[in-house]
Image (cartoon, rainbow, N blue to C red):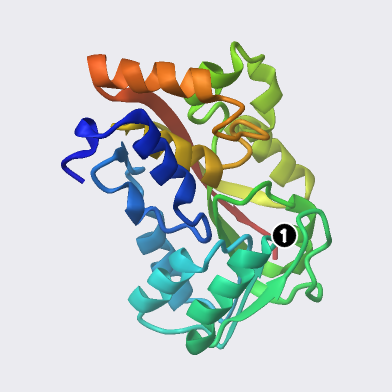
Amino acid sequence: MADHHLRSFEELVAEGAAVPTEGWDFSWFDGRATEARPSWGYAVSMAERLSGAHAVLDVDTGGGEVLDFALGRATRVPTLLAATEAWPPNVAKATELLRPRGVVVVACTQDAPLPFADAAFDLVVSRHPVSAPWHEIARVLAPGGAYFAQHVGANSAFEVVEYFLGPQPEASLSARHPDRERADAEAAGLEVVDVRAERLRMEFHDIAAVVHFLRKVVWMVPGFTVEAYEPRLRALHEQIEERGPFVAHSTRHLIEARKPE
């Protein structure tokens, strides 16, 4: 959108507040925000693993977009495909997208046990799970099976959080540190094969992008509303107009673990 710098604060905020937030399709941000991608190319790597698997579970599938992409790239489609999702609008979206590919989408609340039998899957995947339920992942994996996922790391987009909430104790997000995740996976009986972490540059080019981001990624600034944060939003709008994009950094890690034979 070439003209967004010419538009008023009120127009931009109204636009960011009106965009639907279902699913994990971020195409609306094109031209308004950027985020560098991890070097490992998770969705393409997932496609390679799907090609060699028989029974696959995708945890926290969102709107199903990543699994749909990976299945489209797989050279062979697994016999059994299931996905879980907690948020009702996403359950509907994922079902519509994935049913034609033979995926059963199961609504499953965040803290509930995975609704599948022990050793049901030889591959469990997830891109950005809310939190990895390690003991449940280990339970539903068959011996020799693998967990292959991309997680949001510790202190991701922390510059955004601290802009709105002030300085935060870093320890509050340590559960997402790769070392902690490795330890939790091992405590659940899995062997960690690979962990890679990257810190990636994000840029927000207008205030509409910031508003939409905070509405979509709701845990960043809990209880965020335009009304509650109007003064901070207005100040940030003026900062972007004067100095250019607001820069933050996301953290991502790739983790691969196996259940012993």
Rendered view: 53 above or below 223: below
| Towards the viewer: 22 or 102 | 22
Residue 20 percent across, percent down from the top left: 48, 57
Left or right, 120 with reference to 9: right
Question: What residue sits right under mark 1 in the picture?
Answer: 137
| Towards the viewer: 131 or 23 | 23
Using a 10 Å C-alpha cutoff, classify the residue at mark 1 as few (fewer than 14 neighbours), some (14 to 19) or many (20 or more). many
Amino acid type, residue under disc 1 in the picture:
Ile
- Residue under the point 36% across and 23% down: 237
In the figure, residue 3 lies in which quadrant?
Answer: top left
Left or right, 67 with reference to 143: left
State the residue lying farthest toward the left.
2
In the figure, residue 146 lies in which quadrant?
Answer: bottom right
- Residue under the point 59% across and 65% down: 90
Rendered view: 122 above or below 176: below
Residue 4 percent across, percent down from the top left: 23, 38
Left or right, 170 with reference to 117: left
Rendered view: 125 above or below 246: below
State the residue lying farthest toward the top.
167
| Towards the viewer: 249 or 194 | 249
| Residue 104 visible in the displayed image | yes
